[in-house]
Structures are given as structure tokens and as C-alpha cells.
Image: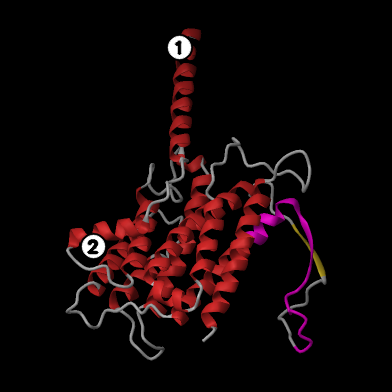
């Protein structure tokens, strides 16, 4: 009996070790890729020119496909071990997904339209809602299936803007279009920065009404409130930020190519390159086996505050870039 129980215990231990090793492998974050080179390779394969918008469309497609095809595939909606026990990679996936959603929406309502009264592009009209399904949906329709449909529609749009015979499919590389998307990126980074900074807890002054004496809000709120990220959520917020900045980094590099003339005219190219440099710092290797949460200037590092520093600087530079694009 004892020998039989020993074999069962040994088998369970072996399964645990195998599951753990698989989880570690699936937790490796995908490497960055060269969006311009990827677009050039795709254009050569399809025998088309690298028209404005081709690199940005390719970046959105490749980032979305990486979300689905990286080691382990898409994990956020898995219901079986070991992925059901993992939280860092699903948090990374959610950060990427949020940036994908923002760019897909801007592609639909801004980049592909000449003015507010113009019609939406059919492929983008179908693609953008596909990315809005819950990231944890697993029964029909599944998140992966809906995202894949969106990717196929994005590929259709990319092919159509590269077709010189298709005059109805366009990508407008204008300063106002770019500024609209950057404003959405600002809000994402601002939120992430605040959540990361709250890892140590903060007593914040309520600035909801921004000092406007005539402003109102639905319900009253205290003048001060303590904000602190749950200890259980600190690593999730950190990896969500890693995913969001990973995706945004690729999108900004694509924008640098497609909006090169606009950025040059506005003398804003250097500002964009500085943002890219700050975001590249967020992707440096995390050597610690766990996300540490030391207090301020204490003995133990606080990875969340380091990440918040890079994101805050990138966000400030994004605001300055938006102002440059708004100038005549």
C-alpha cells in the first residue's frame, strides 16, 4: 500500500514539476520586432508599395498576432492548469490588448477617414468591434476567435490601401489624426503611472474638479483620499504596464515611419524618438524572481515605482508632442 501511494505521490510531483516548467516557459515575454522591416517583407511578398499607413497597419496586425501565437498561445481565458494558475502573462496580454483596442478605434474613426462626415471603411468597421470582446471569454464566441476575425479584417484593409486601383480605401497621415490617437495613449499611460505609484500607498489631494469653482460632479467626494494597490495586484499592474508599453513602443515606431513628413514639418521627430527611448527602458530584463515592493528609499527595490518613472516621463513627452502637433 505504501509503495502504491509512493508511486502516486511521485507521479503527482512529476506532473507538478512539468507544469511548473511549462508555466515558466509560457511566462517569457515576446521579443520586440522591427515593424518597418516586417512591413517591407510583407509588401515584397504581396508585391505592393509601402504606402502611408502600411507600416502602422502591419504593426497593429503583428502585435495582435503575437498576442495569439506566442508560446502557450492566448492564456487569459484558459481554464486548465498550468495557465489557469498564471497571472503575470494574462496581465501582460491585457495591457497589449488595451493598446490594440485604442489603435484599432483610431484607425476606424480617424486615420481612414478624411473628415467627420466621411463614411467608415467597411473592413475597419468590422475589425474594431472584434477586439472589444471580453479578454476572458472562452465559450463561443471565444476571445481568440473574435480577435482573429479582427486581424483578418485588418489585413484586408492593409491590402486595399496598397491597391492603387482602390481609391475608396485610404490612410490619412495628418497631424490632427495622429494627435487624436496620442491623446488616447496619454490617458492609458497616465492611468498606469498612477496605479503603479499606488504600490506604496499615497495620500492624494482630490483634483477631480481641477479647481474650477463652477464645476460639479454626481456625488460628493472627500478632499483627500488614500490610494493603494492591493498587495495581490502589484505584480499584475506591473506586467499589464509591461504589455501596454511593449505594444505602444511598436505602434510609435510605425507612426515614426508613416507620419515622417508631418513630424518633420512640426519639428516633432526628436520628441517622438525620446518617447520611444523611454518606452524601451520599460522593456529591460527583470532579473528579480518576483516583483519587489519596497517603500520609497528603503533597502528593497520597488519595481513598480521604477516602471512608473519611465511611463511618467514618456507620458509627459507625449503631452509635449501633442502640443507640437497642434501648432500651425
In percent of width and height, residue 133 lies at: 42, 64
**97 above or below 88?**
below
**In the foreground, 161 or 323:** 323
- Residue 232 in the figure: left or right of residue 145: right
Q: Is residue 141 visible?
A: no
Residue at which label 2 appears: 43
Residue that appears at 37% across and 70% down: 258
Q: Position of residue 192 (x, y in %)?
A: 61, 60
Q: Secondary structure at mark 1?
A: helix
Tag count: 2
**Start and end of the magenta stretch?**
192-214
* Residue 273 relative to residue 213: left or right: left
The residue indicated by pointer 1 is: 4
Query: Residue 187: which numbered mark, if any?
Result: none
Furthest-bottom residue in this view: 117
| Residue drawn at 60 percent across, 65 percent down | 315
Q: Position of residue 270 (x, y in %)?
A: 51, 67
| Of 13 and 314, the residue lying toward us | 314
Residue 131 drawn in magenta: no
Q: Earlier in the sequence, mark 2 or mark 1?
A: 1
Q: Is residue 205 magenta?
A: yes
Q: Rate crowding at label 1 as few (under 14), some (14 to 19) or many (20 or more) other CA atoms within 10 Å.
A: few
**270 or 86, which lies in front?**
270
Amino acid at each position: 500500500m505504501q509503495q502504491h501511494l509512493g508511486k502516486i505521490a511521485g507521479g503527482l510531483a512529476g506532473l507538478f514539476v512539468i507544469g511548473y516548467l511549462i508555466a515558466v516557459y509560457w511566462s517569457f515575454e515576446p521579443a520586440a520586432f522591427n515593424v518597418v522591416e516586417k512591413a517591407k517583407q510583407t509588401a515584397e511578398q504581396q508585391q505592393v508599395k509601402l504606402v502611408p499607413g502600411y507600416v502602422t497597419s502591419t504593426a497593429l496586425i503583428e502585435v495582435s498576432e503575437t498576442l495569439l501565437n506566442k508560446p502557450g498561445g492566448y492564456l487569459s481565458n484558459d481554464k486548465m492548469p498550468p495557465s489557469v494558475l498564471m497571472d503575470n502573462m494574462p496581465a501582460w496580454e491585457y495591457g497589449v490588448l488595451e493598446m490594440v483596442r485604442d489603435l484599432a478605434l483610431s484607425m476606424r474613426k480617424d486615420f481612414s477617414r478624411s473628415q467627420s462626415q466621411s463614411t467608415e471603411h467597411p473592413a475597419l468597421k468590422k475589425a474594431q468591434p472584434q477586439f472589444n470582446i471580453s479578454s476572458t471569454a472562452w465559450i463561443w464566441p471565444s476571445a481568440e476567435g473574435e480577435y482573429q476575425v479582427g486581424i483578418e479584417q485588418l489585413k484586408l484593409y492593409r491590402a486595399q490601401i496598397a491597391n492603387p486601383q482602390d481609391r475608396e480605401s485610404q490612410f490619412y497621415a495628418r497631424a490632427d489624426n495622429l494627435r487624436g490617437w496620442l491623446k488616447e495613449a496619454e490617458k492609458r499611460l497616465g492611468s498606469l503611472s498612477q496605479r503603479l505609484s499606488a504600490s506604496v500607498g499615497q495620500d492624494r489631494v482630490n483634483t477631480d474638479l481641477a479647481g474650477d469653482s463652477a464645476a460639479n460632479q454626481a456625488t460628493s467626494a472627500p478632499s483627500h483620499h488614500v490610494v493603494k494597490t492591493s498587495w495581490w495586484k502589484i505584480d499584475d499592474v506591473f506586467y499589464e504596464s509591461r504589455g501596454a508599453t511593449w505594444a505602444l513602443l511598436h505602434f510609435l515606431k510605425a507612426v515614426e515611419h508613416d507620419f515622417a513628413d508631418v513630424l518633420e514639418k512640426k519639428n516633432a521627430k526628436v520628441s517622438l524618438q525620446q518617447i520611444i527611448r523611454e518606452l524601451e527602458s520599460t522593456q529591460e530584463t527583470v532579473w528579480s524572481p518576483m516583483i519587489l515592493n519596497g517603500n520609497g528609499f528603503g533597502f528593497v527595490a520597488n519595481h513598480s515605482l521604477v516602471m512608473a518613472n519611465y511611463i511618467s516621463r514618456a507620458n509627459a513627452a507625449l503631452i509635449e508632442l501633442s502640443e507640437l502637433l497642434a501648432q500651425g
